[in-house]
Image (spheres, helix red, strand yellow):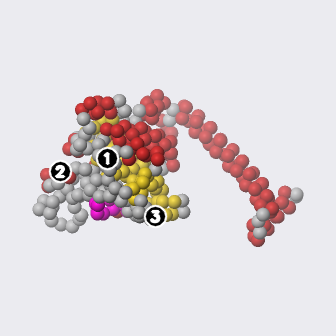
Amino acid sequence: MNGHSEERVMATPTILVITTNPPKAGEVDALKGFGVRIIHWLETRKIRVSDYEIVVVDTRASAFRGNANRGLFKALQSDVQTLLQAGGVVFVLAGETFSIETPRDRAPGPGEPETNYDFLPDIFLSKTRLNESWSKEGSNYDAIPEWSSYFDHVQTYTKTVLGIEIGEHGPELNYGYIAERVRPIALTRATSEVIACLTSWNGGTIVILPAPTQLYMPLVFLAQRGVDLYKENVEQIRDYAKPPDWLSDFKTQQQKALEVEENELSEKLKEIKAKANSLYLAATVLFSTGRQLERAVSKIFSDFK
């Protein structure tokens, strides 16, 4: 891979939309100009979702109930996780939860029946309970202004996102071993329950949204917003994934030079912070008390030595 190919990927992320209710033919053609490809749910058996940087999943596919379609949603889960780990973005257009297996079709034995949300990571589902919580229709909600273009096409919502807690840095989904911050996008008016939000997952982004009444204009909005989110994720991907040592043999000269410069600037920043912190500590003698005051006075006298 060279610098040119990396620029191309960053500049033109590809977008896959999975739905059973595609826009009109003319609108589909127009969406191609945004790098959008639209496929039917049944086509997911033939393609690799992780070949795309941004995926929009329309969960409204209840026509697929029945034994013949068992595994349709679960089969995407590994691919979706691979996409997220690479910094990808998954938009979930949330409709009612349904079991793909009818009681008559379900095979005997332990385990929960597959649902139309089982393409998402198991741990994420166990926290948010999108695959098992009740689906009730509501219409009284408020969305943040920067998402108004999307919500202009949303009349009702059917799901709330459970499991969100208030942590040290605000709303989060706490999985025990790690807490991922949550950015609420829309809340119910009476109870402030979350019906739309954005959250990180292993370096990627999962966005839960109420399904719109029609797809064309919302997809135009999501295509643009998805590109922004993807670029943000890629810039931060090194925080989540430590590359193996052998990868250094394949780095370009430009990448090596930038990493050397980055390390030098990081060290210089540490030195500046240390000096600034030292001066700040001495300055706290003007307003601090107790142990903090003792430390500040000791710092001042130590500077006279």
**Cα separation between marks 3 and 1:** 27 Å
Q: What secondary structure is found at the residue carrying circle 2?
A: helix
**Cα separation between marks 3 and 2:** 35 Å
Confirm or deny contact between disc 3 and disc 2 (CB under 8 A). no
Give above or below for 210 relative to 215. Answer: below
Q: Who's the residue at 56% across and 36% down the image?
A: 256
In magenta, the rendered stretch is 127-136
Identified by mark 1, the residue type is Pro
Residue at mark 1: 212
Residue at mark 2: 63
- Relative to 42, is 293 on the left or the right? right
Identified by mark 3, the residue type is Glu
Q: Is residue 71 magenta?
A: no
SS assignment for the magenta stretch, majority: loop
Q: Quadrant of the C terminus?
A: bottom right
| Nearer-N-terminus badge (1/2) | 2
| Nearer-N-terminus badge (3/1) | 3
| Residue 194 seen in this snapshot | no
| Total numbered badges shown on the rendered structure | 3
